[in-house]
Image (cartoon, rainbow, N blue to C red):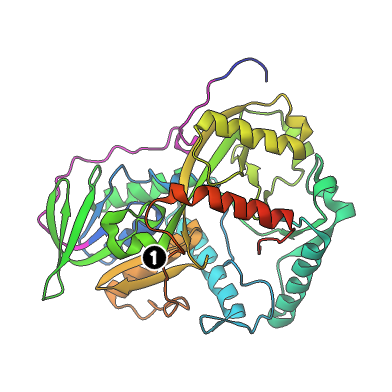
Amino acid sequence: MTGMNKINEQSLWWDNTLPLSIPDTSLPQNTNVVIVGAGFSGLSAAMELRRCGVEVTLIEKEWPGNGACSRNLGLVMDRIDGTTTGELDGLVHGVKKYELIKEGRRAHDYVIELIKRENISCGLRQRGKLILATTKSVYETIATSLERIKEKSGVVDAYMVPKQELYKEIGGQANKFYCGAKVEPNAYDLNPGQLTGELVQRLIDSGTTICSSTQLESMQRHANGSFTISTNQGNITAEHVVLATQGYSGAETGFLQKKIFPLLAHVVATEPIPEELMSELLPTLRGVVDTKQMFYNFRPCDKESRLILASHYCRTDDNSTQSNRILNAYRKLFPELAKVKAEYCWHGNLALPGDHLPHIGIRDGVHFCATPSFSMALYLGSKIAKRILKADDASTLLDNMPAKDFPFYSGNPSLHYPALRMLFHGLDYLKIAAPR
């Protein structure tokens, strides 16, 4: 674990997985549904529609899976931000928090059911998740919320770990930095690159028209409700349009761009480390997140030989500089990483709505969704398809939650990055935790 090394700037999850070889396909003149964006929400919508025999054209400005769907940590989330603290009967856009907790669980369950139904091989493992509390008051708040949820539902698949027992879950200097944790023992993690590749392959096998290197330029809606979509590869007419661009929504997406802030996140994968060191740092091999605003988020990779690390968001430095920054930050938590090097560093955009809540909707006949959670993206993509199909189970609790413009965002995220970093660091200095 010594010597000079050159950073691999591609996602670790792409190794032997992505990109797939896509059949050469010209843009058709007509289709039933055009889906713009081949990330998880777009792939999910396309699969649901193709299963019901609907003609789908999927257009992607790069190649299917190139965006955040194959760049994230692969932790299958079951929560919606801001729903697990405070009174569970409190309202969020008119919906009780407790009901939104259940909606987050539905998204999680949808992902697991999709993987099992389609027999997808993607390193799915039920190793659990660890949520580290940065202060004693945060620990107590999480514990109180857990008790309230237990009272409401009768059972909770989570438990608290006090500070003096943290060593059972995490090594290094965790006892110095954290005041306890919540364990969700039944949480899943997976290889997002393999999941993406398997979904794309199923669409190829189903005869879905997939057009890579196809950039949306504009959309025009006609009096009869149909659309003409203009791209760099020509025009296509469709009955329905789905904007599944998420954190890569540019000016060409019109109204959607200002509703989704592209939160820039870098991820580091270390070089392979010895099994005994991995067991020392993470005895239970769970994925981990803490309650800081500029949060740590890390896990063993699916082969358990590398650590996958994320933190220090909203920085536009090159991958080499950022990898050093992230690894040095984690060395404070894990001094044992002093001689361990970063082998991979990549970045991608998380789709961050202004209120941090997931959204699904229709505007001027165009379907869209927005969420930073890949499990919710898959879930909402299927719900968009069911809306188009007029299925009985198309509705969600999120249907009546208006997606507002992200505050002060005009389409240039680099202007926001320094301010957001200052805000996050300021809140962390004041010990104001992020809801987990």
Q: Is residue 269 left or right of residue 146?
A: left
Which residue lies under the disc numbered 1? 369
The quadrant in which residue 181 appears is: bottom right
- Which residue occupies 58% across, 36% down? 268
Q: Nearer the viewer, residue 49 or 104?
A: 104
Q: Secondary structure at mark 1?
A: strand
Neighbour tally class for label 1: few under 14, some 14-19, many 20 plus, Cα within 10 Å: many
**Residue 126 visible in this rendered orientation of the protein:** no
**Residue 102 visible in this rendered orientation of the protein:** yes
Amino acid tagged 1: Cys
Whether 358 is among the magenta residues is: no
Q: Main secondary structure of the magenta part?
A: loop
Quadrant of the snapshot with the N terminus: top right
Q: Nearer the viewer, residue 130 or 285?
A: 130
The stretch of residues the image draws in magenta is 6-33
- Which residue occupies 61% across, 72% down? 83
Residue 187 coordinates in the image, percent (x, y)? 63, 58
Q: Is residue 323 left or right of residue 415?
A: right
Image: 382 above or below 64: below
Residue 104 coordinates in the image, percent (x, y)? 55, 69
Whether 14 is among the magenta residues is: yes
Q: Nearer the viewer, residue 33 or 371?
A: 371
Mark count = 1
Residue 426 coordinates in the image, percent (x, y)? 67, 54
Pick out the residue farthest to the top. Answer: 3
